Amino acid sequence: MQPHSVFYDHIGGVVNQGNFRSIIVLNGQIPDLAFFQSHNLPIIAVDGAANKLVAMGLKPDLVIGDLDSIHPHLLSQLDTVHLHDQDYCDFHKTINHLQSINLLPSIITGIEGGMIDHILQNINIFVSTNSIFYAPPIVGYILCSGEDKRFNLPINTKISLFGM
């Protein structure tokens, strides 16, 4: 079985058709190096997620946030956008910045990391992005009212639905 086949089975060929413009990495569980190397998309680390990427041998294209969680020695080695506004979380600031430079929609990884309030906030922000998230082996989508989406899933596949 191909690594990350559940992800590719769900999305088909849409990644390679230009539907996604970046990969956003939050500080939760993230895919392995092969996943990131299989896409020709800019990799955007949300603050401390840069530590994980560098530890796995991957240099993010950009690090965005208040930069309070990234290892200080990495600051001079990586391209960063320092957004110190404490009224918004780093993920929210990242989404706003990426929207302004036309790097959305994205494949979002690491969305489920941290305390439950962080996870719920991440999902709340995710809902506004028209992106997908990948938390191996989970793939998350947003379906809007009236939208038709078909999935080719094995029998007994579990699906969670949230009304927002």
Image (cartoon, rainbow, N blue to C red):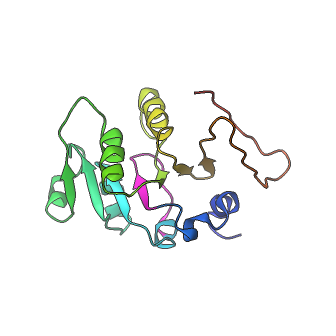
Is any atom of residue 47 visible in this view?
Answer: yes
* Front position in the image: 111 or 54: 111
Q: Position of residue 149 (x, y in %)?
A: 72, 48
The total of numbered circles placed on residues is 0
Is any atom of residue 49 visible in this view?
Answer: no
Q: Write the residue at 69% across / 37% down.
A: 146
Q: Does the magenta run of residues contain 79?
A: no
Q: Position of residue 24 (x, y in %)?
A: 41, 54
Q: Position of residue 155 (x, y in %)?
A: 86, 49
* Front position in the image: 132 or 130: 130
Q: Write the residue at 47% across / 44% down.
A: 129
Q: Which residues are magenta?
A: 21-33
Q: Write the residue at 62% across / 48% down.
A: 138
Q: Write the residue at 36% across / 57% down.
A: 102
Left/right placement of residue 147 relative to residue 157 reads left
Position of the C terminus by quadrant: top right
Q: Quadrant of residue 22?
A: bottom left
Q: Position of residue 118 (x, y in %)?
A: 41, 32
Q: Does the magenta run of residues contain 27?
A: yes
